[in-house]
Image: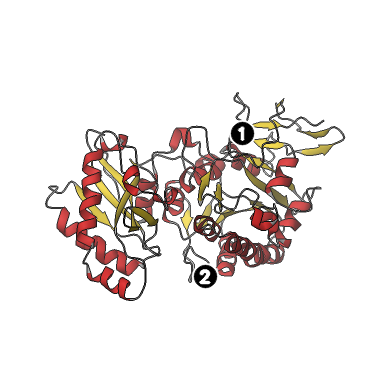
Amino acid sequence: MKYVVVVPDGMGDHPLKELGGKTPLEAARTPNMDFFAKRGTAGLSRNIPKGFVPGTDVGCMSIFGYDPRRYFTGRGPLEAAELGIRLNKDELAFRCNLVTTEGEILKDFSAGHISTKEAGALLRFLDEKLRRAYRGRIRFYAGEGTGYRNLMIVKDGKREAEKAFCTPPHDIMGQPYKRFLPKGRSAGMLVRLMMRSRELFKDHPVNRRRAHEGKGEASMIWLWGQGFSPRLPSYAERFGLKGAVITAVDLVKGIAIHAGLDVIHVPGVTGFFDTNYAGKAEYAVRALRTRDFVMVHLESTDEAGHMGSAKFKVKAIQDVDRFVLGTLKRRLREEFEAYKIMVLPDHFTCVETRTHSSDPVPFLIYSNKEERKGPAKFSERTAAASGIVIQQGYRLMGMFISLSQGGRVRWMEAGPVGVHLTNMPVKLRHIGKGFGRRHPPDTVGSDSIRIRGKK
């Protein structure tokens, strides 16, 4: 059995007036997702545990099958792993965005999607200017592939900077940035670094050139997502699988590295609308020739949400469906006798608010060896209507794999009285309409799966 997981980052959303009360996923033409959903199972998965800030770091850790409450230490150390940075026990990794401000307003969390080359020049300049002043306690690293995503490493033996409260810049676009500067213990040092970068970047040749070209300048660094290196059990230990991950996003690569999975690099992958969608799917099929599992992560759907563009988000979803899922549907049939595919986002990225939310996300699971009767259209609404809710999202991966390995867990069946489970203890509880609420009601208890009561 071959396992494929496709993650259109931030694909979930709320209904939008400009789409006639539909979500972008409902408005998009998705014949391939609908094919898998109609012959498979759909439901909701709560990937963001209560108390966690919704983001790709936490959401994808859940999708990979790791409980964020146990294993998540921060975004920074995950991205450090992808860059080959080995953190010592006293070293803390911060995400270091390059951002654009306009007056006192944070205008763009990506500095106009600044190039990796330009970001490298700015970060090297900053490192030269500040490392000596801080006696070697800090060092800056430019990211690879996406210029605004960079890192700062801090020696923090007293574990003080770890406790600073730092806000993701993509959550505060269009707002006065000074209200969201780091707060709490050791925040003073972080604020000084950020404001000093503002002074140093002001007349840098990179920014002068970008201003001349009408592009967004890198006004300053923005520090957030700090953490020490996590310790994850490998996929071979947990699931007995050899696998790989395809993504343009460093933190997803970092989770893969910590999980003992291979990271496959695909030509033309950008993490944006112009990415090589079909190439990702083709390389995924090739990876499965020598592996059991592959995850394909797409970032364009998330970027469209942060831009506040329903049009771009619908287009990104359609591109994922046509070029990724369409290619996979054809190539998996050609190459493998038995395969399973799961499609789900890590979190919602809402066009209306231009940021993430913790809503349970829709998922579908399809097996070519065990076709079922699911919804005709895959969406947040039809997934919610199934009544299936995975309350602890990190358990979904284990269920997905166990079903094909003869495990005790068997999947959901539609029955005359709604939805029921076979061979799995479960409580029935009505949890309200759920979909469309900005803060869906929590249910209390340790059960992994809850089923909506049906009237």
**Residue 84 seen from this side:** no
Q: What's under tag 2, amino acid-wise?
A: Asp
**Residue positioned 59% across, 38% down in the render:** 46
The residue lying toward the viewer, choosing from 203 and 126, is 203
User: In this figure, which residue is indicated by the disc labeled 1?
Assistant: 391
Image-quadrant location for residue 191: top left
Which numbered marker is on residue 213?
A: none
Residue 257 visible in rendering: yes
Query: Residue 156: percent from the left, percent from the top?
Result: 23, 39
Element at label 1: loop
Which residue lies under the disc numbered 2?
274
Q: Residue at x 31, y 64 (%)?
A: 119
Q: Is residue 198 left or right of residue 377?
A: left
Q: How is the image coloured?
A: secondary structure
Q: Residue at x 18, y 46 (%)?
A: 137
| 3D distance between C-alphas at marks 1 and 2 | 35 Å
Give how far across and how far down residue 337 sits, in percent: 72, 58
Crowd class of label 1 (few under 14; some 14 to 19; many from 20; radius 10 Å) = many
State the residue in front, 57 or 51: 51
The mark that comes first in sequence, 1 or 2, is 2
Amino acid bearing label 1? Gln
